[in-house]
Amino acid sequence: MPKPVITNPDFFGFYDLLGESERAELAEIREYLEREVKPLANRAWDTSEFPFEVVEKFAKLRLASYQFPEHGDGVRRSPLFTGFLSLELNRIDPSLAVFSGVHTGLAMGSIYHGGDQEQRDRWIPDMVEMNRIGAFALTEPEGGSDVAGGMRTTARKEGDAWVLNGSKRWIGNGTFADLVVVWARDEADGNVKGFVVEKGTPGFTATKIEGKIALRTVQNADITLTDVRVPEANRLQQVNSFRDTAKVLAMTRGGVAWQALGVAVRAYELAREYAVERVQFGKPIGGFQMIQDLLVKMLGNITAMFGVVVRLNELVAQGSGSAEQAALAKAFTTTKMREVVAWARELFGGNGIVLDYEVAKFFADAEAVYSFEGSREMNTLIVGKAITGLSAFA
């Protein structure tokens, strides 16, 4: 009797490390995403418009509460659960996963970890309900990887308010966010501080970046700040330097590693399905040696990626995960993801470049995932310093 075909890309069963209740919850989330969110994804990507009906759908899932259970249902999930949740979101659509990640990870994370209790109580409950959407404004037109030392956006204290001037670029959710966490350098002491700029504040303008080839649904914005006045009550009270900003980035960087895994998993699933259905020369192309070689290389990469991200989340759960480990995870998984999506697109041949077969979207979106939250090169230098004791940063 022939053995059953193994369709699961989790070849070594990492999913089984979750508890029974968390596996059941993830299964419900996957079914909901497949039914309610996936039908919106391709059209939104094609038109590069954000499907605002997805906000209500994500709110019903309580996606924003999982990392902040005291503001949600009070149930604390494991770090491994939040990792698999990221995988599921990205498996459905990387753009919509970025929308959620910017809101819950970068914006809410900045307020939760950088704000005081009054600020958390003021903003987090509405953000959990997705009644107010957040954005995170760090990157600048002339500064990406060097933004820590080269930030040009300034903050000047005037009485009980701050005046912000400068520009930001690539700000996800920036065109419609209700709360934008803006990072600016204090003119008085030279340190980077965080400010929550509320929608409608005079002097704040956001313009959608057009013509993207990746994460097309994400509404990235160019933001201009011209004498934007922000009350002292909106300055994140626990942020005193860029090191505090970096702590938020270190937490979300591990999430990007899971994002890369979700992209790779879906590309592999699409390629495997196509290989057993597509007939050429009288048989499914999956029966040819070169096609099987591509599939096995994809699966090997995915299995290695699973090992890295699962172990990283175990370390986080123990309280011992480091920024350097998160940097290695991000650099490694995004590199392997890039290989997987390229092999998947190759397997589809000409069909791999049209949205009808979906793999084209994941192939394109992988380029953005590879670049943001610290490029491979910058994450390499973080790890390189850790293992040699020598800084190679310019």
Image (tube, rainbow, N blue to C red):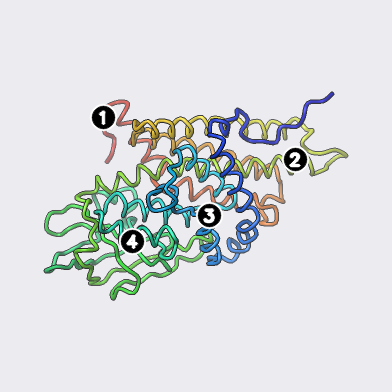
In this view, the mark in front (2 or 4): 4
Of 96 and 171, nearer the camera is 96
The CA distance from mark 4 to mark 1 is 41 Å
- The residue labelled by disc 2 is 275
The quarter holding residue 390 reads: top left
Say few, some or many: other residues with alpha carbon within 10 Å of mark 4 (under 14 / 14 to 19 / 20 or more): some
Quadrant containing the C terminus is top left
Name the N-terminal-most of marks 4 and 1. Answer: 4
In the displayed orientation, state which residue is furthest to the right. 282
Quadrant containing the N terminus is top right
- The residue labelled by disc 3 is 61
Say few, some or many: other residues with alpha carbon within 10 Å of mark 2 (under 14 / 14 to 19 / 20 or more): many
Q: Who's the residue at 43% across and 31% down the image? A: 314
Helix, strand or loop status at disc 1 = loop
Asked if residue 49 can be seen in this view, the reply is no
Horizontal side, residue 162 vs residue 111: left or right: left
The image's mark for residue 123 is 4
The CA distance from mark 2 to mark 4 is 48 Å
- The residue labelled by disc 1 is 390
Q: Contact, CB < 8 Å: mark 4 with mark 3?
A: no
Q: Contact, CB < 8 Å: mark 4 with mark 1?
A: no
Give the answer, above or below, for where 232 lies relative to 251.
below
x and y percent of residue 331 in the render?
Answer: 44, 37
The CA distance from mark 2 to mark 1 is 47 Å
